[in-house]
Image: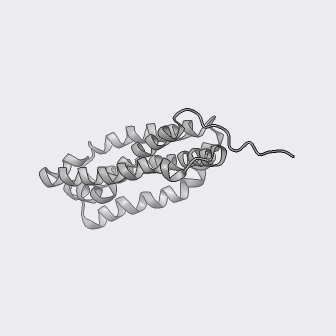
Amino acid sequence: MTSDPGPAAAPPHFVLRVSAFFGGYFLNPGVVLPWFPVWLHGRGLSDVEIASVIAIPLAVRVSLAPLGGYIADKTPTRRFAARLFLAPAAIVFLFAWTASTYWPLLLITGAAFTLWQLALPAAEALALTGVRRFGLDYGRMLLGGSISFVLANLAAGALLSLFHAESIF
């Protein structure tokens, strides 16, 4: 009779590290989802321009997701793949502060949001590896992201109530 040894031991602090990644990752959408249109309006964009700055990059992200998955599969690790997309996204986001008209904002934020979004499948694959190989709880790993999303949303809203829309980005 053979006995099942159960799942292997997880690397030290695996849950904490994945949760911290999700926490950092979801700070951005915690601010952007509710407040990005307000910031764009503060930049002088019309309602139609704001809608397209939000919608067009979404369509691009959806169409590029398979390419992002392909690239992530070719990287040495899932962690490397997530960083591969997040580092350039963060740099591109910085250029959005210098843009004040429609086309530059569309192109810059579109590129940044696309790169940002492509990192999530790699991070989720890493978390699911922890579930499968080590018997870890996916919900506990995602908890950091949920908490940071809510806190970022509330903090940005508080800043917006005290200052101009520029203060939240």
Hey, which residue is sitting farthest right in the picture? 1
Hey, which residue is sitting farthest bottom in the picture? 48
Taking 29 as reference, is 169 left or right? left
Q: Which sits in the foreground, 100 or 58?
A: 58
**Colour scheme used in the picture?**
one colour
The residue shown at (63%, 37%) is 9
In the image, residue 114 lies at what x, y percent? 46, 50
In the image, residue 8 lies at what x, y percent? 67, 39
In the image, residue 1 lies at what x, y percent? 87, 46
164 versus 14 height, above or below: below
Q: Which sits in the foreground, 11 or 90?
A: 11
9 versus 158 height, above or below: above
Q: Indicate the quadrant where residue 92 lies.
A: top left
How many marks are shown on the rendered structure? Answer: 0
Taking 167 as reference, is 129 left or right? right
Q: Which sits in the foreground, 43 or 122?
A: 122
The residue shown at (68%, 43%) is 7
Hey, which residue is sitting farthest front in the picture? 1
